């Protein structure tokens, strides 16, 4: 099963992707992680991406699609793939669709994690995360343990992102809606879109996603 997770920054896509990896043996394909890994491994596309990044330029869609192709060709996605952070634009969505067809793969569902902006701002400005493993904490709903150690990996390197403030978050939300929200209509028209409440608690969101994927 191959799926796309859509939602604004802070909607919980990363958290739900990790649960799908653990429970369904899926492989999470995050654009930033893929670019860094391809560069480290010195793949053909990784070298191209490295040259572009060294110049301070944005990596083109063609290179990103090439890196995704390299990942799919490794055939290590026993339970399927989760596309997290890609596509972001209609052009990318169409390119990904062509690639999946060319690779003999299907796109089974697009999960939109819907949120209320004001509630999301409140949640994110109270957020911290473990730098080592990515476990997320919240001052109100899931405080950092009293000993300051991550419950998942034991690291004491729990940080608050400097851009997790209201002004920065609203700027990121505006950019998301301007650039990525057209994908909602695109995938709805194709019959692929499933919507879940992204502001429910983590287990409720996971249950809603599981139901949408049945």
Image: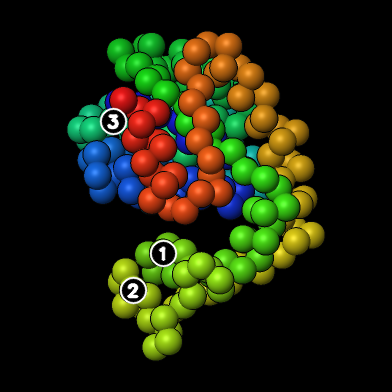
Give the camera-side residue of 180 and 208.
208
Residue 154 picture location, percent across and down: 31, 77
User: Badge 2: how crowded within 10 Å, few (<14), some, or many (20+)?
Assistant: some
Q: What residue is pinned by disc 2?
A: 151
Coloration mode: rainbow
**In which image quadrant can residue 207 be found?**
top left
Please report contact status of discs 2 and 3: CB closer than 8 Å, yes or no.
no
Q: Earlier in the sequence, mark 3 or mark 1?
A: 3
Q: Quadrant of residue 176?
A: top right
**Residue drawn at point x = 36 percent, y = 31 percent:** 211
Image quadrant in which the N terminus is located: top left
Disc number at residue 80? 3
Quadrant of the rendering where the C terminus is positioned: top left
Q: Residue furthest bottom?
A: 147
Front residue of 153 and 140 = 140
Earlier sequence position, callout 2 versus callout 1: 1
CB within 8 Å, label 2 to label 1: yes
Q: Name the residue that disc number 1 marks.
A: 135
């Amino acid at each position: 099963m191959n799926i796309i997770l859509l939602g604004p920054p802070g909607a919980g896509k990363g958290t739900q992707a990790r649960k799908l990896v653990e429970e369904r043996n899926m492989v999470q394909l995050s654009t930033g992680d893929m670019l860094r890994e391809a560069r480290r491994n010195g793949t053909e596309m990784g070298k191209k991406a490295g040259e572009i990044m060294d110049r301070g330029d944005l990596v083109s869609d063609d290179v990103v699609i090439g890196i995704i192709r390299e990942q799919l060709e490794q055939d290590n996605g026993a339970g399927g793939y989760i596309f997290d952070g890609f596509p972001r634009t209609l052009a990318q969505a169409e390119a990904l669709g062509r690639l999946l067809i060319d690779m003999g793969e299907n796109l089974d569902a697009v999960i939109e994690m819907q949120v209320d902006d004001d509630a999301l701002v409140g949640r994110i400005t109270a957020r911290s995360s473990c730098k080592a493993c990515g476990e997320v904490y919240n001052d109100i709903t899931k405080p950092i343990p009293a000993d300051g150690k991550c419950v998942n990996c034991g690291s004491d390197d729990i940080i608050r992102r400097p851009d997790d403030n209201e002004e920065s978050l609203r700027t990121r939300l505006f950019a998301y809606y301007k650039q990525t929200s057209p994908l909602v209509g695109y995938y709805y028209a194709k019959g692929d879109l499933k919507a879940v409440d992204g502001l429910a608690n983590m287990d409720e969101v996971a249950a809603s996603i599981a139901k949408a994927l049945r």
